[in-house]
Amino acid sequence: MNNHIKHKIMVLSGKGGVGKSTVSVNLATALAEEGFKVGLIDIDIHGPNVAKMLGIGDKKLEATPKETILPIKVFPNLSAVSIANLVDLSQPVIWRGPLKQKMIEQFVKDVEWGDLDYLIVDSPPGTGDEPLSALQIIGDMDGAIIVTTPQGVSTMDAMRSAVFVQKLNSQVLGIVENMSYFVCPNCGQRVYLFGEGGGESLAKELDTDLITRIPQNPELMRLSEDGKPASLYMRGTEMEAVFKELAGYVIKKLKNEKEEDKPNE
Ligand SMILES: Nc1ncnc2c1ncn2[C@@H]1O[C@H](COP(=O)(O)OP(=O)(O)OP(=O)(O)O)[C@@H](O)[C@H]1O
Ligand SMILES: [Mg+2]
């Protein structure tokens, strides 16, 4: 197998449901839109959502004669793998650590990714088996994007995820604050449903950047349910802009030398 992957990024959070999968999917599609070749691994074995959010929930992973795995092509330069493309989703996956580790190892080592500019890894919440295995197996991860909502119960848990990343000799690339505010459809006023400033103070504490703030928008959620990433299906809106901002940040942050960061041919 001949994989050449330039950059590997993990998306993490302390608390569940804050938008990791949303950020992973839209970062991946926004980077693919820029012409980069992108792979997305869903290592959330007990709650895999990436396949549904990308509209590939009904596709099944196929093995090659060499017993490697073909990732599912979402569009020409975006591929993804998730346990959702392997098992019956109406049944829980009841696995202990070693089996989960084996699965993650296969998703990293046995998938025919080919040449990728970016590999994005979507994690379950917290600092358990799955992100630990992924960080250890991938080894040369460029770093992690930490997703949080603005309130203290989320930023406090996000801080632990950041320390986890640093303890494993990787770096925090920046913070994404999700569900930052809701724009009232009647008067256009911003309503801060979960408070204000949590992402910014977390970024300050960690001496990193608050990359972007994603508003709360029911349209993003509805589109997600239908497998339509907001970065592609909410053109000309603030939503498209925040995901472009996120992709632009990642490209710039990981650009070491100009030559290195041209899209793979
Ligand atoms: N900015 C937003 N506006 C509206 N809905 C959102 C927003 N961000 C996420 N959601 C919705 O909130 C739910 C949780 O988001 P998501 O699945 O991305 O979180 P997660 O952190 O990956 O969750 P888990 O911890 O279970 O993996 C989803 O239904 C998603 O569509
Ligand atoms: Mg998720």
Image (cartoon, rainbow, N blue to C red):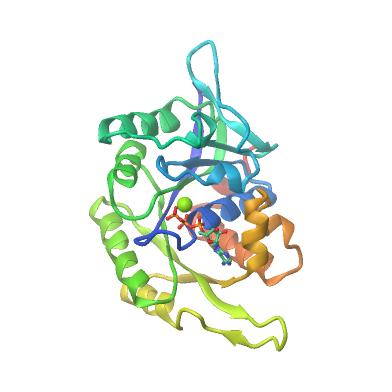
Question: If the image is split into quadrants, where does the C terminus sit?
Answer: top right
Q: Residue 52: x, y in percent?
A: 59, 44
Residue 235 in the image: above or below residue 62: below
Identify the residue at image location x=48%, y=15%.
Answer: 67
In this view of the protein, which residue sits in the foreground, 206 or 98? 98
- The residue at the far top in this view is 65
Q: Residue furthest front?
A: 90
Query: Residue 142 at what x, y percent from top left?
Result: 41, 50
Left or right of residue 193: residue 104: left
- On screen, residue 260 versus residue 198, left or right, reads right
Residue at the (71%, 89%) spot, across then down: 187
- As displayed, is residue 226 above or below residue 80? below
Give how far across and how far down residue 234 sits, in percent: 73, 62
Q: Is residue 228 above or below residue 109?
A: below
Residue occupying the far right of the picture: 236
Q: Is residue 139 left or right of residue 88?
A: left
Q: How many marks?
A: 0
Q: Is residue 207 visible?
A: no
Is residue 48 something one can see in this rendering? Answer: yes
> For this view, does 61 lie left or right of residue 172?
right
Q: Residue at x 28, y 43 (%)?
A: 129
Residue 114: x and y in percent read 56, 29
Nearer to me, 54 or 243: 54
